[in-house]
Amino acid sequence: MNQKAFFDAWLLLAVALLLGLGLVMVTSSSVTLAENQGLAFLRYANHQAIALGLGLLAALVVTYIPIEFWQKISAPLLLINIFLLIFLLIPGVSRQVNGSVRWLFIGPISIQISEFVKLAMILYIASYLVRRKDEVKNNISGFLKPVILLTIVAGLILLEPDFGTVIVIVATVMGMLFLGGVPYRRFISLFGLAVSGLLLLSVASPYRMARLTAFLDPWADQFNTGYQLTQSLIAFGRGGIFGAGLGNSIQKLLYLPEPHTDFLYAVLAEELGLFAAILVLVFFCILVGRIFSIGRSAILAKEPFSGFIAYGIALWFGLQSMINIGVNIGVLPTKGLTLPLMSYGGCSVIVALVALGLVFRIDYEQRRKII
């Protein structure tokens, strides 16, 4: 590590490449969709560029704020987000979009509250693990308290409904608790209970169960439950090793649903090929690995709050990217989750960049101690 630098060069490189490639692919994958909806053909690309600009500005501001500030406001921040989740569910407050009430509309601006909840939960759990570290390690109550809070938050998000986001938040928080010192046996038993609950919710909902099992044999019902996955697999097959060429995707021509969001990775594989798809995986591995490394450095430097924040963000990015890519290649059930830093989505991009701003601040504070 270059002790004279004030940032992690590999992390910065991975972030820049993912953001740049993501903007290119959002532009390519959304043109036909925008024209079909009667919108300007660069409508989605322009919105994504604006979100990137706002996100980068927010991330820059965050890098100037000491990490201890976030520890002080972690509880109020989470309470505000929980209140907004409840407010969102009040009839008449939010409009339904594709059967969900995930967005709070303020004039022309739509805000997806659950994206902010991800970061708020990470900050609060990191603070909790520092304040209650002995209780977490020695008493069952130290584990049950955040689990009860997690259950409340997950329940509110399920009412939207947004099952994919619940999976990411539950897995991220459970991972943070495990890294925070929860005894192995206690963690396994309650984690198993959480997984059982999620499976029960899946079985209890016929449409959700159909989506969960369709990936096992999508061709059996390729024009209904297996439609999204079969179109995605066709995109991968058509792309081959080096792709059909940027802009030459056939599947984005209204065959593949959500080509600019959930299935951006499939369009990328079709246009740029297996080589580029693997390269994206490498970028994400570098991203997550470097964030974990920064978290580990903070823990060793006796800055546990900073360390747990980094661990939580690494788990979040790693899990969500793994689920999105797994869905695209057909090894996981279809879930409505974007590919972090790459897929279209203003709130998701802005919150992800704010989270990375926190990581760069943590890294800066650790490096400043060394110099």
Image (spheres, rainbow, N blue to C red):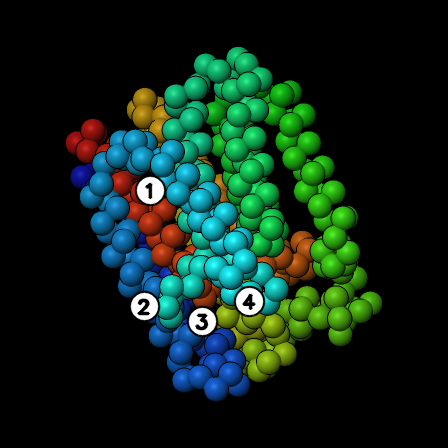
Residue 50 is tagged as 2
Badge 2 element: helix
Q: How far separated are the C-alphas under marks 1 and 2?
A: 22 Å
- Kind of residue at disc 1: Val
Give the residue pinned by disc 3.
26
Q: Residue at x 36, y 46 (%)?
A: 355
Residue contact at pointers 1 and 2, CB within 8 angstroms: no
Image height of 194 relative to 64, above or below = above
- Kind of residue at disc 3: Val
Could you tell which of marks 4 and 1 lies nearer the N-terminus?
4
Where does residue 116 sit, x and y in percent of width and height?
Answer: 42, 49
Could you tell which of marks 3 and 2 lies nearer the N-terminus?
3
Nearer the observer, disc 4 or disc 3? 4
Give the residue pinned by disc 1.
359
Q: Decide which of 259, 270 is in the foreground and name it.
A: 259
Q: How many marks?
A: 4
Q: Is residue 280 in view?
A: no
Could you tell which of marks 4 and 3 lies nearer the N-terminus?
3
- Kind of residue at disc 2: Ile
